[in-house]
């Protein structure tokens, strides 16, 4: 459900801005649909040209700034037209579920990127882009999906639909339901429909179902309306109206069970408990139920009161606006209020509520039938005494019910109420002031202690100020009186905090992954079996290894597959990849202050977050892969981590300078670095780091069983002859005193081809190998000329 009253307010502003700015700036959306509809023909002989023409007017949607999905999909269509044609046929197949089609399109795009990306790191075919294709094809059914926009619109209109990072399937389904609701309301606004029809031109899609108009309204809410501070003063409305019900009459009504039903009394009690003034969102978070329970319940109650008493009510065209002023005065919510409208109990009603017995009325909503009933707690740790960061995941910890002087802990009843299975938000107080962990109660108090277990450390802790600025949490027990250790959370408060946590610490949904072992590695990475066994043994012994070797031996390719083979499956959630460069810093790697709008915030780096992730699953191996490790200033990047990298110090904790928290490198984390031995512009890594890594030389694998099988599968004499020449070249490079075996030519230059062509092979020689030789022998043109003749002579 959405707040239809507030949507009406939004639409009034939208209509005011439509002719002056909105249509001028956003007309291209209707033109983009018309262009696509006029040009799309999936069976076109020249598919690539047809696709280019169809997407000709989507620049602002698919090709703006660094967002390049149309460029990439058009390039793929040139390189592989039939594959891309099949992708669009599958995407537009309405017999399949929409999210599955989107996922399939993304998967196929990733495959095309590997085949035809030519070094590109991204195919850009994300949910936003793919939903745009769907909308262009079926403009009377679909909308453009954009996570941030959907989340803002849902929040602004107090929608029940939730949008969470990483929950792609639910987000897409909820976006369609949310925009369908908005679209239904647009159809009722004749003034807006007439306004659109007046501005449509022959170059525009007529938009009979108003789906494109709905997209534009959502964009307007997200980009403009949500950023306005709608409140110019604190006046309450309506000022000219009163239901003319005295306090004594309210008491009489409150005792009338036909008027004030149990749910009506619950609404009143919760308003009163919250201080007499709240948004529906705040009540939902604090006491349970959903926003519509409070919204619709209040309107229904007011109607019954009007029928019973004959009191005057407002003559408003909108149903809700006639009735809620009987119970409340209200105002639009400001940016500091969570929700869209603030309701305040009428003074006479508020006084009457103090004079009736509400002790048997439920303050908190009961969980639905079949749902486990658990308690939720905020556990406050003082790092000077103990810290969540010092506890390993899965480790149990006790907390005494009495302090050192034998006195009861503050809010002692909370320690008695906590039960096994209750969920815990782990917070660390001064000087850290962040949520850093999640836990659960494993055993209730035994008269002396309560026992809990840490179940997850947060890769990105949640700052106190972030929580404090959330109006939904303003009545949280900890914020009302922070003196103590264990504080009660309502179901709504816990869910709200968990939403904040999961936005920054998403749990990756693990799909079925393919098994991968030693034999799979040897099929793909051209390395002798005994060398593989040695490599695995060295890595497991040292836990840090650098794969070094000349260009083209497949260091990066081998690193990831080495990780797969040890994990036992192709689980990318347990692998992280980063590339060092001269500007890379500790702030990027671990943590540092970064500008955010008009201030600086502490941001956690990729290695910090990955270590926390590994620590949360101590029984599984995790791999951190660093490409071009010797390109970075390693002392600057690693800082105080140098000691922690050593195997003997894994699990040892240090206090970080930036935030005062404990940190350790988990024992189940392996680090794999790659280093190009042929790059003379780079210095060798310093000795302090060198002794913490083992070094493993990757050599050209022309004689490995795997490469020989690959060569034989192509069965091409030209290739065989060229490979023989390259092996001779490598011998000469190895014997060259100014070069050595670290400058040899690797086998990967000749890999990755399912079908052989001399054009491809000759281009490898001309544009990859010979330019490298010209660098090697820039001072010996005769040697360069000789090898150029030998290598190109293969093709004569």
Image (cartoon, helix red, strand yellow):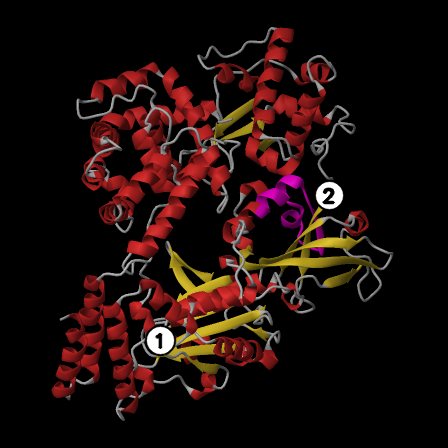
User: Quarter-wise, where is residue 781 in the image?
Assistant: bottom left
Tag 1, which secondary structure? loop
The residue at the point 78 percent across, 28 percent down is 360
The residue at the point 81 percent across, 67 percent down is 404
Q: Could you say which is closer to the camera, residue 583 or residue 53?
A: 53
Range of magenta residues: 475-498
Q: Is residue 88 above or below residue 726?
A: above
Compared across the picture, whether 399 is left or right of 707 comes to right
Q: Is residue 567 above or below residue 470?
A: below
The residue at the point 48 percent across, 67 percent down is 521
Q: Position of residue 492 (x, y in %)?
A: 63, 39
Residue found at the very far right of the displayed protein: 447
Compared across the picture, whether 790 is left or right of 659 comes to left
Residue denoted by label 1: 702
Q: Which mark is residue 374?
A: 2
Res 457 seen here: yes
């Amino acid at each position: 459900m959405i707040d239809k009253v507030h949507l009406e307010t939004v639409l009034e502003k939208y209509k005011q801005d439509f002719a002056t700015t909105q249509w001028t700036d956003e007309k291209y959306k209707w033109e983009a649909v018309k262009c696509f509809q006029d040009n799309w023909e999936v069976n076109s002989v020249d598919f690539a040209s047809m696709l280019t023409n169809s997407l000709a007017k989507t620049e602002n949607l698919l090709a703006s700034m660094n967002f390049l999905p149309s460029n990439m999909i058009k390039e793929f269509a040139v390189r592989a037209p039939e594959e891309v044609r099949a992708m669009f046929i599958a995407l537009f197949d309405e017999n399949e579920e929409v999210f599955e089609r989107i996922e399939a399109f993304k998967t196929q795009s990733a495959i095309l990127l590997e085949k035809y990306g030519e070094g590109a790191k991204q195919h850009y075919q994300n949910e936003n882009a793919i939903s745009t294709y769907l909308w262009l094809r079926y403009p009377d059914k679909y909308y453009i999906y954009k996570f941030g926009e959907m989340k803002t619109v849902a929040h602004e209109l107090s929608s029940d639909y939730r949008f969470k990072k990483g929950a792609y399937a639910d987000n897409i389904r909820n976006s369609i339901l949310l925009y369908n609701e908005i679209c239904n309301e647009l159809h009722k606004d004749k003034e807006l429909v007439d306004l659109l029809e007046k501005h449509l031109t022959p170059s525009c899609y007529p938009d009979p179902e108003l789906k494109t108009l709905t997209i534009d309204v959502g964009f307007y809410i997200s980009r403009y309306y949500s950023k306005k501070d709608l409140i110019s003063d604190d006046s309450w409305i309506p000022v000219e109206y009163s239901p003319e019900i005295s306090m004594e009459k309210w008491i009489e009504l409150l005792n009338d069970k036909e008027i004030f039903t149990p749910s009506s009394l619950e609404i009143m009690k919760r308003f009163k408990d919250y201080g007499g003034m709240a948004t529906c969102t705040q009540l939902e978070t604090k006491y349970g139920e959903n926003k519509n329970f409070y919204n619709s319940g209040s309107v229904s109650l007011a109607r019954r009161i009007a029928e019973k008493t004959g009191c005057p009510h407002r003559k408003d065209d909108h149903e809700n606006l006639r009735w809620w002023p009987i119970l409340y005065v209200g105002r639009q919510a400001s940016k500091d209020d969570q929700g869209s409208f603030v309701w305040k109990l009428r003074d006479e009603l508020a006084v009457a509520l103090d004079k009736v017995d509400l002790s048997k009325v439920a303050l908190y909503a009961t969980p639905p039938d079949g749902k486990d009933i658990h308690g939720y707690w905020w556990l406050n740790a003082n790092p000077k005494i103990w810290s969540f960061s010092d506890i390993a995941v899965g480790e149990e910890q006790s907390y005494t019910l009495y302090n050192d002087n034998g006195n009861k802990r503050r809010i002692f009843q909370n320690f008695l109420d906590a039960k096994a299975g209750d969920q815990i938000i782990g917070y660390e107080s001064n000087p850290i002031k962040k949520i850093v962990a999640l836990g659960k109660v494993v055993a209730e108090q035994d008269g002396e202690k309560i026992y809990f277990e840490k179940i997850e450390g947060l890769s990105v802790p949640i700052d106190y100020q972030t929580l404090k600025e959330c109006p939904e949490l303003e009545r949280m027990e900890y914020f009302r009186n922070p003196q103590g250790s264990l504080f009660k959370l309502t179901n709504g408060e816990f869910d709200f905090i968990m939403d904040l946590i999961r936005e920054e610490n998403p749990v990756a949904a693990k799909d079925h992954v393919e098994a991968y072992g030693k034999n799979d590695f040897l099929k793909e990475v051209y390395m002798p079996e005994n060398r593989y066994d040695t490599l695995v043994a060295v890595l497991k012994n040292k836990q840090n290894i650098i794969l070094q070797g000349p260009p083209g031996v497949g260091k990066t390719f081998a690193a990831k597959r080495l990780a797969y083979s040890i994990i036992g499956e192709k689980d990318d959630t347990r692998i992280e990849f980063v590339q060092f460069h001269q500007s890379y810093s500790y702030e990027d790697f671990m943590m540092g202050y970064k500008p955010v709008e008009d201030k600086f915030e502490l941001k956690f780096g990729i290695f910090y977050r990955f270590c926390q992730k590994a620590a949360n699953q101590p029984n599984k191996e995790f791999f951190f892969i660093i490409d071009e490790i010797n390109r970075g200033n390693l002392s600057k990047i690693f800082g105080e981590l140098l000691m922690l990298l050593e195997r003997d110090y894994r699990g040892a904790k240090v206090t970080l300078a930036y935030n005062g928290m404990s940190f350790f490198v988990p024992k189940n984390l392996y680090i794999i670095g790659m280093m190009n031995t042929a790059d003379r512009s780079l210095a060798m890594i310093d000795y302090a780091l060198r002794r913490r890594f083992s070094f493993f030389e990757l050599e050209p694998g022309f004689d490995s069983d795997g490469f020989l099988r690959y060569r034989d599968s192509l069965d091409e004499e030209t290739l065989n002859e060229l490979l023989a020449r390259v092996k001779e070249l490598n011998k000469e490079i190895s014997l060259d005193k100014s070069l050595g075996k670290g400058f040899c030519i690797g086998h990967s230059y000749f890999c990755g081809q399912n079908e052989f062509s001399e054009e491809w092979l000759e281009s490898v020689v001309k544009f990859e190998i010979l330019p490298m030789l010209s660098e090697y022998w820039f001072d010996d043109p005769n040697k360069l000329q000789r090898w150029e003749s030998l290598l190109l002579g293969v093709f004569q």
